[in-house]
Image (spheres, rainbow, N blue to C red):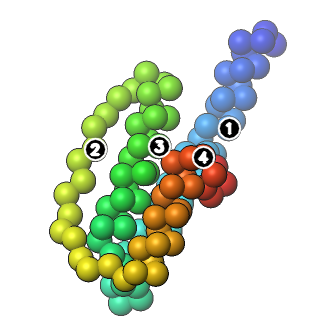
Amino acid sequence: MSKQQEKRARFARMFPARVDTLRDTLRKIANCSNKGNYDWDTDKVQEAWKLIAEEFATTADKYGISFEVRVKAQAKKSDDMFERVWAEHVQAVRNGNGAAK
């Protein structure tokens, strides 16, 4: 098998599994939208989705794919502790020190 064939085989093996993992993670995030079990600050959720969209756009760009995402939501009053923790998390993610990738 040539080196290019090996690379294609490795991609064919790894890429679908990683897509499945990503889709599963998004379904888990969607579970948090259940208002019966959770309450959230719309601004924080909007910011999280902006971060997710940035990651999607950056990753898609590496494959020569581009897209635009528009976030439209109404703000809700936040709680101060969540505000502080969320701001720290967003900063860590943007600095590359966030959750494991």
Residue under label 2: 69
| Picture layout, residue 31 above or below residue 89 | below
* Callout 3 amino acid: Glu
Residue under label 1: 14
Per the image, label 2 sits on a secondary structure element best described as loop
Nearer mark to the viewer, of 3 and 4: 4
C-alpha distance separating marks 2 and 4: 22 Å
| Picture layout, residue 21 above or below residue 60 | below
Of the two numbered discs 3 and 4 on the same chain, state the one appearing first in sequence.
3
Give the x, y percent position of residue 4.
Answer: 71, 12
Q: Quadrant of residue 79?
A: bottom left
Per the image, label 3 sits on a secondary structure element best described as helix
Of the two numbered discs 3 and 2 on the same chain, state the one appearing first in sequence.
3
C-alpha distance separating marks 1 and 3: 19 Å
- Could one spot residue 20 in this view of the protein? no
Q: Quadrant of residue 61?
A: top left
C-alpha distance separating marks 1 and 4: 23 Å
Nearer mark to the viewer, of 1 and 4: 4
C-alpha distance separating marks 3 and 4: 12 Å
Residue under label 4: 96
Give the x, y percent position of residue 98.
Answer: 60, 55
* Callout 4 amino acid: Gly
Q: Tell me if label 3 and label 4 are in contact, CB under 8 Å.
A: no
Question: Total number of numbered labels?
Answer: 4
Per the image, label 1 sits on a secondary structure element best described as helix
Of the two numbered discs 1 and 3 on the same chain, state the one appearing first in sequence.
1
Residue under label 3: 55
Residue at 47% across / 68% down in the picture? 86
C-alpha distance separating marks 3 and 2: 11 Å
Residue at 41% across / 88% down in the picture? 37
* Callout 2 amino acid: Val
Q: Which mark is residue 82?
A: none
